[in-house]
Image: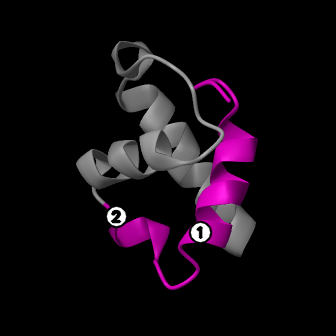
Amino acid sequence: MKWTEVQEIAIQLSEAHPEVDPLKLNFVDLMQWVMALPEFDDDPKHCGERILEAIQQAWIDEVS
């Protein structure tokens, strides 16, 4: 899984952390949690604020 697979990342994060409100998560933790996903395999340098915002929004949409 790569940074560009925003929807899939959001689904896996919502399953891995069902108790977390994605609105209250900071980007440092979000980035670490994404990189810790078992299927994730991408360079951290390919991640930026826009990608993290997209992942956070997709996660919000997933749990809404």
Residue name at image x 59 percent, y 60 percent: 13
Q: Which mark is residue 25?
A: 2
Q: Which mark is residue 57?
A: none
Residue name at image x 45 percent, y 47 percent: 36
Q: Residue 4's image quarter?
A: top right
| Residue density around tag 1, few if under 14, some if 14–19, many if 20 or more, within 10 Å | few
Please state which amino acid type lies under the numbered disc 2: Leu
Residue name at image x 44 percent, y 28 percent: 50
Region in magenta: 1-25
Q: Residue 55's image quarter?
A: top right
**Cβ–Cβ under 8 Å for marks 1 and 2:** no
Q: Which quarter of the figure is the C terminus placed in?
A: bottom right
Disc 2 secondary structure class: loop
Residue 41, percent from left and from top: 57, 26
Q: Which residue is mark 1?
A: 16
Could you give the CA–CA distance between mark 1 and mark 2, rounded to whole angstroms?
Answer: 14 Å
Question: Does 9 appear above or below 64?
Answer: above
Residue name at image x 53 percent, y 73 percent: 17
Q: Residue 14's image quarter?
A: bottom right
Q: Left or right: 5 with respect to 41?
A: right
Please state which amino acid type lies under the numbered disc 1: Ala
